[in-house]
Image (cartoon, rainbow, N blue to C red):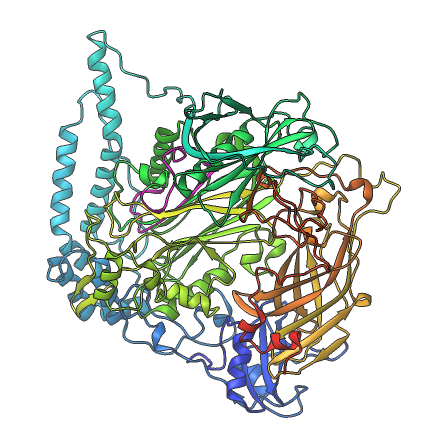
Amino acid sequence: MAAASWYHRDISRVVAEDLLAKAGRDGCFLVRDSESVAGAYALCLLFQRHVHTYRILPDDEGLLSVQTIQGIQAKCFRTLPDLISAYQQPNNGLVTPLLYPVHRHRDAADEDSDGEDGRGNPAGSAVPAGGHGGSTGLGAPPARPHISQQLQLRLQEQVHSSPASDFMGFMAEYLTQHLQLDLEALRNGHLQLRHLSTALVTACGALHRRVARGQDTGTAGTPASSPSPSPARPSPQGFLASDPDLELLLNKISAVNHLLSSLEKKVLRSLQDTVSRHNLALPSLAAPPPATKPLAVQSFEVRARGGPGASVAPGWGPPQEPLLVPQVKVGKSQRAALRVDVELGTVTVAKKGSGSPEEIIPQDKSMGSGAGGRAPRAGGSPPDGRHSVLQLIKYQSVQSKVRLVYDRDPQRSLSKDFVFPSARKREAFCQLLQLMKIQHSNLDEPDLISVYVGTWNMGSAPPPRSLASWLTSRGLGRTQDETTACIPHDIYVIGTQENSLGDREWVEFLRASLKTLMAIDYRVVALQCLWSIKMVVLVKPEHERRISHVHTSSVKTGIANTLGNKGAVGVSFLFNGTSFGFVNCHLASGSEKTHRRNQNYSDILRSLALGDKRLNAFDLTLRFTHLFWFGDLNYRLDMDVQDILSHVTKKEFGVLLAVDQLTLEREKNKVFLQFREGDISFPPTYRYERGSRDSYMWQKFKTTGVRINVPSWCDRILWKSHPETHLVCNSYGCTDDIVTSDHSPVFATFEVGVTSQFVPKSAPGSSPEPPACIEWESIEVIVKTASRSKCYIEFHSYCLEEAQRSGENNSQSCDVPGFLRMGWSAKQLPVLNPILSDLEYLGDQHLLLSIKGVESCESYGECCIAMRSMIGSTAQQFETFLFHRGEETGSMRGWMKVRVPKERHSTRERLYEWISFEEEDETPAADTPLCPKPPLGYPPGSALPRTPSPGRAEPCPAVPRRSRPHSLPEASSYTNPAYFIFEGLP
């Protein structure tokens, strides 16, 4: 029985409504999988330009019924087609009978013409095994092109030998002449594929002989004193178990594999026995790990200018006092040398040719103490009155310039400007000072960690002996300076595709490489593999206890979404109080497969099971503080190959990025909504000639002709973070000396702010003041839907004991066709009570909101709101987009406030907040009042006033300005008519 054409499997609500809107007739209907109840369905019915959604639920006996209001007897049906047939009759309780089924649409672009991704399906995902199709009588999928044709295309891509080779000929003969015989036998219950076994044995005759020779040679070379019989290989069960020749071949391969894996140990043991007779000694295999390499003193040639200024040292004075460090320019700039000694914790300034003594600025070691590393700011000076670095300010207009602010005495500080030879040298200096500050602080838990992310399509070839350039971010693009390249990162996340190495072999190879480079024995947090797609997460030993709640998952997007040659692997975990997610993917190949790649992305986004299970209803991109997505995304350049080569030669990467498929699809909001990517300043990483990086091998010869693979940035690293969190990309590039694959390895490094498991100074409930609370004045939502369903809002956060929900919306309108506008007043919105009331704790928290239909309980969109900007006694406005299953589904705005008791207002400076950005000096008018400095707990980008820079005061605006959030485009750039309602436009 053919599959019911009105059943669209797991398409989203938005896609279903779009299909019904295009049909445009009352009584049009389709059925999709329910998003809120596993094993249930959603019946979507169009009537009077609005979509009505009914849930179809199974009972304990598997009978299906349309959900009804309480007290009304439900009609039960054995199969889904039976239910649909019954409701095609009038007077069955629906707004209109089911009249016109909306058929599944097959897009030829989803077909895999090059054989790498297999067949597509109308919704982008097949019914999973054991899913709905078999239990509801929907039958098998409609007929496809003959399986032998699909397998021949697949075989041509997978076999690396010449199309005229014997093996290819044997397999082609089997597919055309004998495959049907095996299929018939399979239908009759015979599981032994006799003809396939015969074809394999014949085709592998040469392999059989080579394995035998290798086994004989390996056995002959094994020392007689240490025989090692091969382990008995378990008899294979299944299709090919009946052929003795094939069984013999498999046993021989297993024996050779065991022999090779143990050969090194046997040779080493034999050498040890030999040298011991001559009183020689070999180093022990279990040698202690080398000590961590001390970082050498680094020197920078700069031009310096600076002068004294009176100030209360920031971080020690009262929180609301102004930071006044006026810059007094003294003469011309002088050449100087800056020396940074991370181990001693000092910065030395030596002016050249002036005869003045060197100035040494030690790093104060008193920062941070107490439970959980929390030290409230208080008045006074540093405990011992020493100099210390107070702040680093990077100039945005001059990328090589930085200002160093440090204290001279409790009431006075100095600031000096330094101009480096390049922006890269400035970044290296800032990283060293930040590392010095981390090492010499007394914090129990880190505020800042470094994360390395690497991706590489290995092309099914073994890696080179050294991965040094990849693991130290050296090569092309924005790379690490040589002074900081060997500073070890806290976390390494390494994703590979087409990796032919064994899982354990690959992990140990990476650990050994890092141990050689960094002298640190990194620990394995997770290893997740899907066929040749692998991801390894390694962490410094001292951070191992800080990692918790590790989850792994994988999704297949290959042929019919059942093969893992394409797909993704994912890993998520908590680092103290900060959640991380990592996704390594290999998407569909081919220049013409843009739509298929987009569908791969959507399937992965929907199916990866990562993070807190309580957040499974939320879009994957909202479940983590930081989500990194990388891999061989396979998006290509839409340009003639000769033009591409010309632009690459001239390093005109901007011209090429304008025709980059991933860039174009992101601009259309098709994929990776709200993700970010570093600036690409390196050449396309695919498709190189193996063994060199001098030329691209853009022609691929196939039996069907010559296929053009234009040079492209297939290998990418993107990320998405919660609002008002700290993440800086310090490098993004590729290597130029690893040439074993037709792809170049890509790397990116990040500076990430993290939060600790907060320990309050006083027990909850011990204060006479009321605890902190989150209050809402109003919320207004616009969602893209043709439904008129009432909705409620669910509130989730780690700072809440459990999820909360609002009442139904009290206002609703459809001013624009296809969009629903809803509103909630304070009466319908709950007052939320966080589990802790401390300002420092609440400033790190986020709220996840989900708009859900009252009848279907399905989400119309989700969003994330940072609480940091909402803290205060007066309500603050917020606005943000809504997302669901990777799509933008609407927008939300409203007014809220987070009340915090006064005695819980203490906070502290974070290690990453002492580096800020500033434009060139602008002298304020003499009569301009000065703004007080906000608490250091609020970094730039929050809704509070921006921190003025040392050296100049900042004018106070006459009227508080509220700029549009950075996550939103300007109103004039909207293409979605729903947003015009917010702006009061027609």
**Camera-side residue of 228 and 980:** 980
Q: Position of residue 10 (x, y in %)?
A: 51, 70
Left or right: 357 in relation to 55? left
Residue 746 appearing in the image: no
> What residue is drawn where x is 51% and y is 52%?
627
Q: Is residue 526 above or below residue 941?
A: above
> What residue is drawn where x is 25% and y is 39%?
464
Q: Position of residue 704 (x, y in %)?
A: 17, 70
Is 497 covered by the magenta stretch? yes
Task: Indicate the quadrant containing the C terminus: top left, top right, bottom left or bottom right.
Answer: bottom right
Q: Residue lying at the far right in this picture: please name it.
A: 768
**Camera-side residue of 806 and 567:** 806
Q: Quadrant of residue 311?
A: top right
Q: Quadrant of residue 638?
A: bottom left
Query: What's the magenta region?
Result: 475-503
Task: Indicate the quadrant containing the N terminus: top left, top right, bottom left or bottom right.
Answer: bottom left
> What residue is drawn where x is 55% and y is 31%?
438
Q: Residue lying at the far top in this picture: please name it.
A: 279
Is 575 covered by the magenta stretch? no
Q: Main secondary structure of the magenta part?
A: loop
Q: Position of residue 374 (x, y in %)?
A: 68, 34
